[in-house]
């Protein structure tokens, strides 16, 4: 449904164009293995005139692989007593773990949480200071379940605001790794 049809999309399923199948009759449902086109498939063009079809089922498959990795991460979190994070899976299948800015932990505790996950994932990380804040970012790649030749990206993030120069100086002299 588009605005051109005279009807607006309100986030609900549009009425079916065909009557529903009688009860007990098999209805064809789409799956990730279904090669038929989706209304969400799109042509992608690049400079030089090349183009290809970007299939929605490929995005969904990658997101499902990332969700399986996230499930494994949460199980490991429980088994290894790792702290909980805010987790999301992006449309590009990256798993993001973030320490909430509304978290009640002190900056030292937030750093410890971040470093616990960096150590658990073997992630590369960096710290950026400026504009009255401290920003920690980490990145790791792990094999996709059932497809070890593919990798899933995991991004870690923590940010907190520094009230004044004294607190920033204290943070700079704080121990950076209190794990293990």
Image (tube, rainbow, N blue to C red):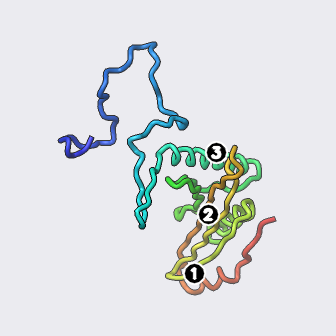
Question: To which residue does mark 1 refer?
Answer: 129
Q: Which mark is residue 156?
A: 2
Q: Residue furthest left?
A: 6
Mark 3 surroundings: few (<14), some (14-19) or many (≥20) residues within 10 A:
some
Mark 3 to mark 1: distance in Å?
Answer: 34 Å
Q: Residue furthest right?
A: 180
Q: Secondary structure at mark 3?
A: helix
Report the mark closest to the observer, 3 or 1: 3
Q: Quadrant of residue 6?
A: top left
**Which sits in the foreground, 178 or 116?**
116
Q: Secondary structure at mark 1?
A: strand
Report the mark closest to the observer, 3 or 2: 3
Mark 2 surroundings: few (<14), some (14-19) or many (≥20) residues within 10 A:
many
Residue 45 % position (x, y): 41, 59
Decide if residue 147 is in sight here: yes
Choose the circle earlier in sequence order: 2 or 1: 1
The residue sitting at 44% across, 14% down in the picture is 25
* Residues marked 2 and 1 touching at CB (< 8 Å): no
Question: To which residue does mark 3 refer?
Answer: 68
């Amino acid at each position: 449904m588009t605005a051109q049809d005279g009807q607006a999309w309100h986030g609900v399923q549009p009425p079916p164009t065909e009557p529903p199948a009688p009860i007990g009759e098999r209805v064809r449902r789409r799956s990730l293995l279904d090669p038929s086109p989706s209304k969400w498939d799109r042509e992608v063009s690049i400079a030089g005139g090349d183009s290809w079809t970007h299939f929605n089922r490929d995005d969904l498959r990658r997101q499902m692989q990332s969700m399986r990795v996230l499930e494994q991460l949460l199980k490991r979190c429980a088994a290894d007593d790792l702290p909980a994070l805010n987790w999301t899976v992006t449309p590009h299948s990256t798993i993001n773990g973030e320490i909430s800015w509304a978290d009640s932990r002190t900056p030292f505790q937030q750093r410890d949480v971040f470093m616990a996950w960096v150590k658990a994932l073997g992630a590369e990380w960096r710290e950026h200071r400026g504009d009255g804040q401290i920003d920690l970012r980490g990145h790791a790649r792990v094999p996709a379940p059932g497809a070890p030749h593919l990798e899933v990206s995991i991004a870690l993030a923590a940010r907190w605001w520094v009230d004044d120069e004294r607190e920033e100086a204290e943070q700079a002299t704080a121990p950076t790794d209190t794990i293990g």
